[in-house]
Image (cartoon, grey):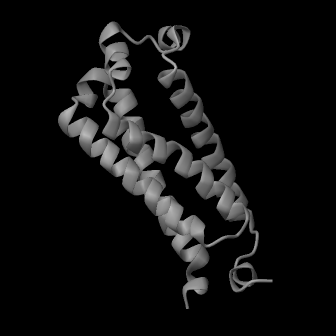
Amino acid sequence: MSKEEKNVRYSWHLLLIVAVFLFLYGIAVYDYIMTVSHNQTYFEYLRYNQVVIDYFTNYPPVPFVFWTINVFGGVVTLLLMLLKKEMAFFFSIITFVSMLLLDFVTFGFLNRWNVIGAKASTIDVLMLALTLGLCVYNYFLFKKSYK
């Protein structure tokens, strides 16, 4: 048994956090796939107008890379947490930083708040805060591994 496996036990809070974030990132993966595939039915279900559809249809490469890292980095983080690997902490940091950069670029330069609206933008900011919380949780979860 490796050093990191000895220090991290499955606890109710680890499983609860993974379950909650798996639900949230599951939604994010679904949204990512539907949006990247330009699924018209999905856009209609969300009541996106043509401005929002054009926003995602013409998404620049740099925010797209941040978005991809954010969505799939979060899922990898959760899997690593379940496997009790300290790399989960580093993946959670990468996920948070990519989300932070995505929000900075899209809110700062691509008018995201006005295009997608206050509700969706608030959810994005909330997810940023929750992902920061996941980073902090992983730090404390694996801090014994760093000594």
> Toward which corner of the image does residue 117 lie, by quadrant?
top left
Residue nearest the viewer, comparing 147 with 141: 147
Percent of width and height locating residue 68: 47, 41
Instruction: Please identify the residue farthest to the bottom as the structure is shown.
Output: 147
| Side of 46 relative to 115 (left or right) | right
Q: Is residue 85 above or below residue 132?
A: below
Return the residue found at the far left.
109
Taking the spot 48% from the left edge, 13% from the top edge, the residue there is: 43
**Residue 124 sits in quarter:** top left
**Residue 147 x/y as whole percent:** 55, 91
Side of 73 where 96 appears, left or right: left
Residue 8 % position (x, y): 70, 77
Q: Residue at x 34, y 27 (%)?
A: 59
Q: Residue visible at 31% across and 28% down?
A: 118
Residue placed most toward the observer, 132 or 1: 1
Quadrant of the image containing the N terminus: bottom right
Give left or right: position of 132 versus 101.
right
Number of numbered markers: 0
| Along the line of sight, the residue nearer the viewer: 83 or 120 | 83
Q: Reply above or below: 85 against 57.
A: below
Give the farthest residue toward the right. Answer: 1
Seen in the image, is 56 located left or right of residue 107? right
Q: Residue at x 26, y 45 (%)?
A: 104
Q: Position of residue 16 (x, y in %)?
A: 69, 56
Residue nearest the viewer, comparing 75 with 9: 75
